[in-house]
Amino acid sequence: IIDLISSNLKALQRSATENSLPFFTQVVEPKISDSFWVNLLGKGYPVPYSRSRWCTDRLKIRPMNEYILSKIAQYGEVVIVLGLRKDESVTRAQAIKKHAIRRTELKSHTFFPGAYVYLPIVDFSTDDVWRYLNESPCPWGSKDTNEELFALYRDAGADERPLVMDESTPPLGNRRFGCWVCTVVNRDLSMEALIESRGISWMKHLLELRNFIASFKEQEQKEKYRDHRRRNGKVHFKKDGKSVAWGQTTIEKGPVSYTHLRAHETVLDLVCRLLLE
């Protein structure tokens, strides 16, 4: 995915320059202090799960919001183009309708008064998206880009709901791609399918590392790999399974952070084996 995105950005920038178009590409990244590994192992944050997705805010929302604010300060207002679609979910459709601005194709931004949102494929279905990509050449000159994207999704989701463009086109999965280390989902089905369909050996170690980290959510692993002290030395105590105090008491201690040496050693071992291969 990263390779595909990088090659697309380079091709887009090259095409814009050759055609004298006022486009430029810039990759927005989180601060090191907000990165996944610094927070998980450096600060001892618990792994992200459905009710606590601290990773989304730090890795995606914050850096993008900072970039948007910098452009509003520079130009007074901005228009953000997003690939959101009503067909994705009922919740997404309701949110899109809520932010609609009368007599315009623009939507209001949730937080920034100087920002507007334009959704060019808002009424597309998933089939519409793939049909367009399959039938239309890439506008910035990478003729193989759509085929490569098509193959990537096909190989990562062969057992999902099939999407068939025509009789000569193989079925395409409806699977999503997220962070390879995501612990919110129970299994990384995309990575499992890519390992099986493409035989990517180095990815097996990523999956092993991801599954190990995801196991931190289990109570047995919490007790084994999470420390009972915060970084400031205070101890977390609980009673009847509920947090009740920070300090020195005789109540049962509860797990806090992942700064336990055994967790570090296991992760380091997996990373070293990945690098060696």
Image: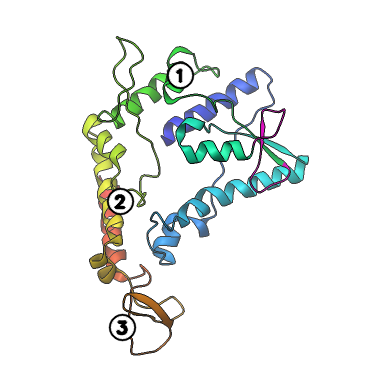
Compared across the picture, whether 140 is left or right of 170 comes to right
Residue at 46 percent of width and 22 percent of height: 129
Kindly tell me whether residue 67 is visible in this rendering. yes
Main SS class of the magenta portion in the image: loop
Q: Is residue 70 above or below residue 227?
A: above
Q: Secondary structure beneath disc 2?
A: helix
Task: Say whether marks 2 and 3 touch (CB < 8 Å).
Answer: no
Q: Can you identify the residue that label 3 sits on?
A: 252
Of tags 1 and 3, which is closer to the observer? 3
CA distance for labels 1 and 2: 31 Å
Total marks placed? 3
Three-letter residue code for mark 3:
Glu
Q: Earlier in the sequence, mark 1 or mark 2?
A: 1
Q: Which residues are magenta?
A: 100-114
Q: Can you identify the residue that label 2 sits on?
A: 210
Identify the image quadrant of the C terminus: top left
Check residue 163 for magenta coloring: no
Three-letter residue code for mark 1:
Leu
Q: Can you identify the residue that label 1 sits on?
A: 133
Instruction: Give x and y (percent) for residue 58.
Output: 52, 54
Residue at 44 percent of width and 75 percent of height: 231
